[in-house]
C-alpha cells in the first residue's frame, strides 16, 4: 500500500500548531417535532487531541450520531460551544461551515452512501469535481487512493459489483480525497462481516499510525472499540465514561 493516503507531513501541520483538535463544552441538542421535544445531547463535554484514534460507544438512541453530526459540522448544537482546531465553528454560517467540513473532515457511514450508477473511481472523484480539479488529475488521484486501499483492480466496478467490505473501502478512499485531518465514521463496520470489519479497522489504524489522521468512530462492537486507543461511552446524551480518565487509558497500544 502506497503513501498517497495523505501526503507526508500534511496531517502534522495542525498538531504542531498546538492545541486540541476538538473541544466541546456543554453540548446540547434538542430536536422539536410535532410538539415533542427530544433531548438528544444533554450537555456533553468532549476534548480530543490531534492524532487520537477514539471509539464512541453507547446504547441505541443515546446521542452518538447527533454528537458525530455536530463534531462533523453537519449540524449545530442548540447550546454549548464547539471549537474545531481552536476555532468556534458554532458561529459560522452554512457556507463557511461547509468549507471547514470539506477542508478538514472525511466521513464514512454504515451504509457506504455510494452512487450506485457510478464506478468506484467516479465515486472517489466526486468531491474533486466540486473542488474544480481537472478530469485527468481526478482520475489519477482516485486511482492512487483506490490502490492504497487495495482496490486497484476494481476502479471501474460499480457498487453492486463489489462486496460490502470493498464498498466501504471505496467510501474510505472517497473520504480521504481532500486530505482530511479527521475521519468521522458512524458504525463503519455495522454492515460488514467480521473479516471485512477487521480489514476496515486495520485501514483506519494504518491511517492513524502512519499519517497521524485522527479517527473518531461510533461502534456497537466491543472488539472494534478495543482496538482504539480511547473509548468514550455515551449515555442519555452525556459522556458517562472516558477510558483515558478512569485509569484504563494508557494512551494507546491496548
Ligand atoms: P444514536 O446514534 O446513539 O443511536 P441518535 O443521536 O441518533 O442516537 O439519537 C439520539 C436521540 O435523538 C434519539 O432519541 C433520537 O430519536 C433523537 N433524534 C435524533 N435525530 C432526530 C431528529 N432529526 N429529530 C427528532 N429526534 C431525533
Ligand atoms: Mg446512530
Image (spheres, helix red, strand yellow):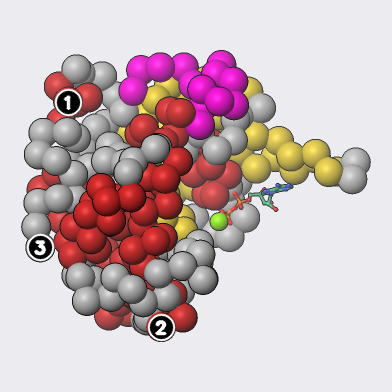
Q: Nearer the viewer, residue 247 or 183?
A: 183
Q: Disc 1 on helix, strand or loop?
A: helix
Q: Quadrant of the N terminus?
A: bottom left
Q: Earlier in the sequence, mark 2 or mark 1?
A: 1
The image quadrant that residue 242 belongs to is: top left
Q: SS of the residue at dot 2?
A: helix
- Of marks 1 and 3, the one in the foreground: 3
Q: Is residue 249 visible?
A: no
Which residue matches tag 1?
13
Residue at 43% over, 21% down: 83
Structural crowding at the residue carrying mark 2, measured as other residues with C-alpha within 10 Å and reported as few (<14), some (14–19) or many (≥20) = some
Q: Residue 187 at x, y = what percent?
A: 44, 61
Q: Nearer the viewer, residue 159 or 237?
A: 159
**Magenta region:** 85-98
Q: Position of residue 10 (x, y in %)?
A: 17, 33
Q: CA distance from mark 3 to mark 2?
A: 23 Å
User: Which label sits in the foreground, 3 or 2?
Assistant: 2
Which label's residue is closer to the chain start, 1 or 3? 3
Residue at image mark 2: 161
Q: Which residue is mark 3?
A: 1
Q: Give me the residue at 59% from left, 20% from top.
A: 93
Relative vertical location of residue 158 with respect to residue 172 in this rendering, above or below = below
- Label 3 element class: loop
Label 2 to label 1: alpha-carbon separation: 39 Å
Amino acid at each position: 500500500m502506497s503513501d498517497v493516503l495523505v501526503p507526508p507531513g500534511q496531517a502534522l501541520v495542525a498538531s504542531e500548531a498546538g492545541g486540541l483538535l476538538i473541544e466541546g463544552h456543554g453540548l446540547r441538542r434538542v430536536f422539536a417535532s410535532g410538539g415533542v421535544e427530544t433531548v438528544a445531547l444533554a450537555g456533553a463535554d468532549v476534548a480530543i487531541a490531534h492524532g487520537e484514534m477514539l471509539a464512541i460507544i453507547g446504547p441505541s438512541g443515546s446521542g452518538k450520531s447527533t454528537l458525530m453530526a455536530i463534531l462533523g459540522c453537519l449540524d449545530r448544537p442548540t447550546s454549548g460551544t464547539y471549537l474545531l482546531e481552536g476555532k468556534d465553528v458554532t458561529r459560522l454560517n452554512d457556507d463557511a461551515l461547509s468549507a471547514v467540513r470539506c477542508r478538514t473532515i472525511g466521513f464514512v457511514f454504515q451504509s457506504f452512501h455510494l452512487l450506485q450508477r457510478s464506478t468506484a473511481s467516479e465515486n472517489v472523484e466526486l468531491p474533486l469535481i466540486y473542488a474544480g480539479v481537472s478530469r485527468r488529475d481526478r482520475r489519477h488521484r482516485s486511482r492512487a487512493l483506490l490502490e492504497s486501499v487495495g482496490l486497484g483492480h476494481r476502479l471501474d466496478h460499480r457498487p453492486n459489483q463489489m462486496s460490502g467490505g470493498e464498498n466501504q473501502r471505496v467510501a474510505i478512499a472517497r473520504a480521504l480525497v481532500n486530505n482530511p485531518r479527521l475521519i468521522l465514521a458512524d458504525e463503519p463496520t455495522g454492515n460488514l462481516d467480521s473479516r471485512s470489519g477487521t480489514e476496515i479497522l486495520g485501514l483506519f489504524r494504518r491511517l492513524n499510525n502512519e499519517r497521524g489522521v485522527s479517527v473518531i468512530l461510533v461502534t456497537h462492537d466491543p472488539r472494534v472499540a478495543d482496538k482504539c486507543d480511547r473509548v468514550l461511552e455515551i449515555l442519555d446524551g452525556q459522556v458517562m465514561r472516558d477510558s483515558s480518565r478512569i485509569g484504563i487509558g494508557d494512551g494507546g497500544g491496548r
